[in-house]
Amino acid sequence: MKFTKEIILEALKRIVDPETNKDLVSSELIKNIIITEDKVDIVVELKKANSPIKNSLERVIKEVINTVVSKNLTVKVNILAPQTAQKPIKVQETAKADKMKNIILIASGKGGVGKSTVATNLSIAVSQLGYKVGLLDADIFGPSLPKMFKVENVKPLVKKMDSKDVIIPVEKYGVKMLSIGFFVESETALIWRAPMATNALMQLINDADWDDVDFLFIDLPPGTSDIQLTLVQNLEITGAVIVTTPQQVALVDAKKAIDMFANPKLKVPLLGIVENMSWFTPAELPNNKYFIFGKGGAEELVKKYNTSLLAQIPLVQSICESGDDGLPSVLNNQTIEGASFKLLAENMLKQLSIKI
Ligand SMILES: Nc1ncnc2c1ncn2[C@@H]1O[C@H](COP(=O)(O)OP(=O)(O)O)[C@@H](O)[C@H]1O
Ligand SMILES: [Mg+2]
């Protein structure tokens, strides 16, 4: 078979640059394609020197070309640093959800499976990769992000912008964060009806100065209530990450959450599944894995829904302790758990860039 530049370009159009939300070809990142028999050299120029896709791009390009064009093609990818100066920082005038590039839901069927732990560590990991990240704690029944970020006593400030009151998110570990817990006691929130809760949440999204973040992660309440439905109907959601533990009871509920997002009226893309507490590893025996909640449950879900397993996070005492202490595990990626959250971020970004 003869390979042409056009065929390669068509394949590269399937890869999306999460920064511009456009494919690699339209975002003009492809600088050259040289084809010699069964070899192709692709030259890519990044827009940012520390572009977070730098490390995964080569692998993604190879995978896509070998899957879509031919597995016999030898692909070489040369990634160039950007030629142009960094873009000046834009002045944010109004705060609006439509300015956010990607809104990603962190959802689960059940409570206590580690949704907030995953939301916290994932958002910090994505910010460490160079993105502007926001995180909204939308769990009105049990907001836990203020504790996980150790900002329980902080009261977010309000400023005037275009003669409108705008809430300033709390900034910590590189993430702009707001929690419903900053504004209402959970006992009060518990008796709210769904429209009240969603109004409050929409206000935190639309009336806060999220400063044009690349990603807004939303830590949802567990389950499939009206709150999830209304948020999904009112916002343009990029995708959902489902968190589950390996037990059958958690998996059954995870399926319900997946089915809700897949409903033709909602059509929220499923980015993948995070299996939390996959196995227990004692600190003194870091190589041992005890599958105390069962094994292979999330893999079953992944097969059933044709999605990807974004990460398996071990059950380790330090994750719980660091959650309680407000020092998220990902801050130390020398540890197994820190590294697993970093891998989760990379896999999620990869999932966003391949839309085949
Ligand atoms: N992998 C893990 N290893 C140890 N403890 C964990 C792990 N994941 C979560 N936890 C702990 O379990 C509890 C529930 O987690 P959380 O993230 O609050 O769940 P959810 O938001 O789904 O209700 C927290 O105390 C948290 O620190
Ligand atoms: Mg939670």
Image: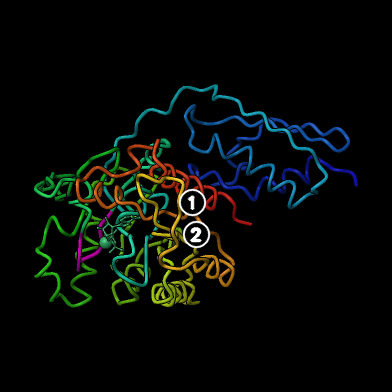
Magenta run includes residue 263: no
Mark number for residue 271? 2
Is ligand 1 closer than 8 angstroms to the Cβ of mark 1? no
Q: Amino acid at mark 2?
A: Leu
Q: Amino acid at mark 1?
A: Met
Q: Residue at x 20, y 55 (%)?
A: 179
Quadrant position of ligand 2: bottom left
Q: Residues within 10 Å of mark 2 (few under 14, many from 20)?
A: many
Marks 2/1 in contact by CB < 8 Å: the verdict is: yes
Numbered range of the magenta stretch: 136-143
Location of residue 325 in the rendering, given as x and y in whole percent from the top left corner: 19, 46
> Where 246 falls versus 209 (above or below)?
below
Name the residue furthest front.
Answer: 284
Q: Residue at x 28, y 67 (%)?
A: 221
Location of residue 353 in the rendering, given as x and y in whole percent from the top left corner: 56, 49
Image-based side of 309 in relation to 159, left or right:
right
Q: Secondary structure at mark 1?
A: helix
Image-based side of 328 in relation to 161, left or right:
right
Name the one closer to the observer, 329 or 272: 329
Write down the residue under mark 1: 348
